[in-house]
Image (cartoon, coloured by chain):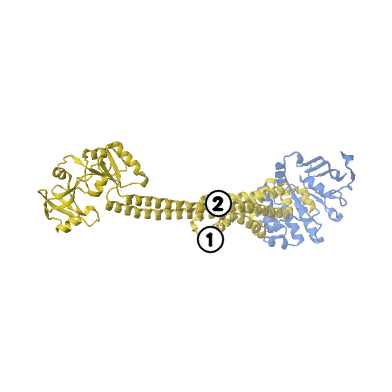
Chain colours: A blue, B yellow
């Protein structure tokens, strides 16, 4: 089977004083096209680090990250940015909406980042689909948590990326809103997209097609890895 | 949603941050533009003051020139050129003439091109007894000016007396009851009185002027004269010695006597007045220059200081803005924005700040300058100043925001997003 996302022996460590903290122990992970994969692990196991590495935002110490067959970390930075804009969507627990933009403008924000314009009708359709049509002119400060997360999800899907990386997207939501967001993610997967969802919630993880587990990270003396 | 739209929306919805930076740019530009306007208006005003003073001086000099001309005309001639053997004491005391020279001397002098001498009048003058009236008179034969070969024709300063005509001095006319048109007889020859002079209080009052040739014939001095009157219309007082030397070079056997020292004094007074006027203008220019230097010195300290403070202020404003927008920067990077896009986001804002600040600051600065110097608003249209201010404001804003903008562009999005 061809994998849309493939992490092979990916490791990430950080120095701290004389110690080296392993943020992400060696990981092998795959997500196929049209697959919804949940990534679970205890707190500090490196779930978010793994997600950032998978999205081309954090260079691993070793290992390979392939998205749609492209090795992300062999690309020049500018090409990687363009590739990310086209193929990867991010959704975070803290939404990261731009506070001075309206809902509609936030959904369109990837245009400024990716330089691809004329997506107004797609933005409106997504807002409609995620129940935000009545909130288009509102700023994030005027939205509920569920609405904020749905806005962030709509923004991630503007360019119909092949892969959506979602980090604890239900962490700040009540049960009903969490289920709503999951339903939207599922809907996206059904259209052929792939989702890697990081969560510590077993019930949420159970909604995925497959669940992967990360072991607890370790702290080693710095010299040990040099 | 373009970067430009993003910048505009950020500015319009976070007015305080932008306004804060704008005040810094406006202040810097106002100080720069104000200083330059003050200096420019100072220069304009200096020019006006000097022009006015020059105009006043010129008018005064024209009046002096006119006075000078009138006085010269009334007093007679600057120089008297006598034959070498003439005793001057006799001439002055008794008008006793003892020496003569050829009339051609006058022509030689005219052809010598002594540039400061404008008029040459050869005369034959003798104190004689007027037999018909039994009076002693001074008979003066004159032929008017010697034509000059090299100068522009000018109105002659003394008109020749035509043959058969006579000009009578005041005292003579009074005593003999003569008036223009009367006929008189002199040494058996008939003359018609063409003019009776006004009283001059000098020997002129007992003088009688006739044509030179007739006088030569009557006095049996054909082709001879005993004086050349050299009139110098345009002269600076200190040129007299030169004129004397030049005349002596052309006519070695003559003596040159200054006549009319009052004229000379007046000419010197006129020169002194001109010099004093020029000195006054120079002093005014010097004072204005000193004032300008002082203003320049103040500007040289104030402008860089304000620019530095403004730059720090703008830098701080942008640094605060970058800190506030860490999450936004992180998510834009996650969405595919390059470092250059993030840099552009902040530098575009700085550019706008610079442009708007330039216009506001320029107007403020010019108005302050105009209010201080009392100039006119047309200074607003000074294109070089506008260009300088515009460029300075943009460079200031962009340069001051560069470090925070670069810092924003270099931020690690993973670090930002993980922190949040």
**How far apart are labels 1 and 2 at the CA level?**
20 Å
Q: Nearer the viewer, residue A99 or B354?
A: B354
Residue B232 is situated, as x and y percent measured from the top left of the image, at: 30, 46
Quadrant in the rendering for residue A4: top right
Label 1 Cα neighbours within 10 Å, binned few <14 / some 14-19 / many ≥20: few
Sequence-wise, the earlier of marks 1 and 2 is 2
- B69 in relation to A83, above or below: below
Specify whether B86 is left or right of B278.
Answer: left
Q: Is residue B23 left or right of residue A93?
A: left
What residue appears at the point 70 percent right and 42 percent down from the top-left corner? A78
**How many labels sit on residues?**
2
Q: The disc numbered 2 marks a residue on which chain?
A: B
Whether residue A69 is visible, yes or no, is no
User: Which residue is the site of mark 2?
Assistant: B293
**Most foreground residue, B231 or B153:** B231
Q: Which mark is residue B371?
A: 1
């Amino acid at each position: 089977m061809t994998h849309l996302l493939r992490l092979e022996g990916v490791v990430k460590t950080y120095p701290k004083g004389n110690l080296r903290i392993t943020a992400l122990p060696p990981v092998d992970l795959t997500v196929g096209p049209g697959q919804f994969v949940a990534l679970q692990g205890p707190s500090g196991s490196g779930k978010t680090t793994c997600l950032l590495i998978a999205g081309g935002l954090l260079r691993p110490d070793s290992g390979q990250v392939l998205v749609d067959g492209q090795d992300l970390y062999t690309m020049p930075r500018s090409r990687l940015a363009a590739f990310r804009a086209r193929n990867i969507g991010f959704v975070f627990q803290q939404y990261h909406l731009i506070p001075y933009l309206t809902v509609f403008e936030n959904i369109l924000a990837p245009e400024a980042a990716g330089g691809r314009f004329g997506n107004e009708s797609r933005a409106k359709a997504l807002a409609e689909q995620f129940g935000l049509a009545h909130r288009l002119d509102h700023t994030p400060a005027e939205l509920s948590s569920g609405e904020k997360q749905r806005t962030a999800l709509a923004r991630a899907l503007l360019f119909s990326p092949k892969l959506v990386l979602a980090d604890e997207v239900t962490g700040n939501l009540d049960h009903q809103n969490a289920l709503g967001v999951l339903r939207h993610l599922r809907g996206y997967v059904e259209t052929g997209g792939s989702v890697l969802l990081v969560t510590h919630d077993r019930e949420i993880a159970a909604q995925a097609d497959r669940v992967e587990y990360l072991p607890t990270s370790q702290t080693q003396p710095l010299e040990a890895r040099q | 949603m373009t970067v430009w739209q993003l910048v505009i929306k950020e500015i319009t919805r976070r007015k305080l941050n932008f306004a804060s930076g704008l005040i810094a740019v406006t202040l810097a530009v106002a100080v720069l533009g104000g200083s330059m306007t003050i200096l420019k208006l100072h220069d304009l005003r200096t020019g006006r003051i000097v022009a006015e003073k020059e105009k006043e001086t010129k008018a005064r000099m024209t009046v002096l020139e006119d006075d000078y001309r009138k006085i010269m005309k009334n007093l007679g001639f600057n120089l008297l050129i006598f034959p070498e053997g003439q005793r001057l004491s006799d001439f002055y005391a008794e008008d006793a003439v003892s020496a003569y020279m050829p009339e051609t001397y006058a022509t030689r002098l005219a052809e010598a091109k002594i540039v400061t001498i404008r008029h040459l009048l050869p005369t034959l003058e003798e104190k004689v007894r007027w037999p018909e009236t039994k009076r002693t008179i001074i008979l003066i034969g004159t032929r008017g000016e010697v034509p000059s070969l090299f100068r522009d024709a000018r109105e002659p300063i003394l008109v020749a007396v035509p043959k058969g005509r006579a000009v009578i001095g005041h005292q003579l006319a009074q005593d003999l009851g003569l008036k223009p048109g009367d006929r008189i007889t002199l040494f058996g020859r008939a003359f018609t009185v063409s003019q009776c002079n006004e009283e001059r209080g000098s020997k002129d009052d007992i003088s009688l002027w006739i044509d030179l040739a007739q006088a030569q014939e009557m006095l049996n001095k054909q082709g001879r004269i005993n004086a050349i009157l050299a009139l110098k219309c345009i002269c600076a007082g200190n040129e007299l010695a030169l004129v004397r030397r030049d005349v002596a070079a052309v006519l070695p056997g003559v003596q040159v006597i200054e006549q009319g020292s009052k004229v000379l004094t007046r000419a010197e007074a006129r020169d002194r007045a001109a010099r004093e006027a020029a000195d006054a203008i120079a002093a005014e220019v010097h004072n204005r220059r000193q004032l300008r230097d002082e203003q320049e010195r103040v500007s040289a300290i104030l402008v860089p200081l304000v620019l530095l403070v403004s730059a720090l202020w703008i830098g701080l404003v942008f640094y605060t803005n970058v800190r506030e927008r860490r999450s936004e920067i992180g998510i834009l990077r996650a969405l595919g924005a390059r470092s250059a896009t993030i840099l552009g986001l902040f530098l575009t804002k700085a550019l706008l700040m610079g442009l708007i600040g330039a216009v506001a600051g320029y107007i403020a600065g010019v108005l302050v300058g105009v209010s201080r110097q009392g100039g006119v608003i047309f200074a607003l249209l000074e294109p070089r100043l506008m260009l300088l201010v515009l460029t300075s404001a943009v460079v200031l804003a962009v340069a001051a925001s560069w470090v925070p903008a670069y810092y924003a562009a270099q931020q690690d999005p993973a670090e930002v997003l993980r922190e949040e």
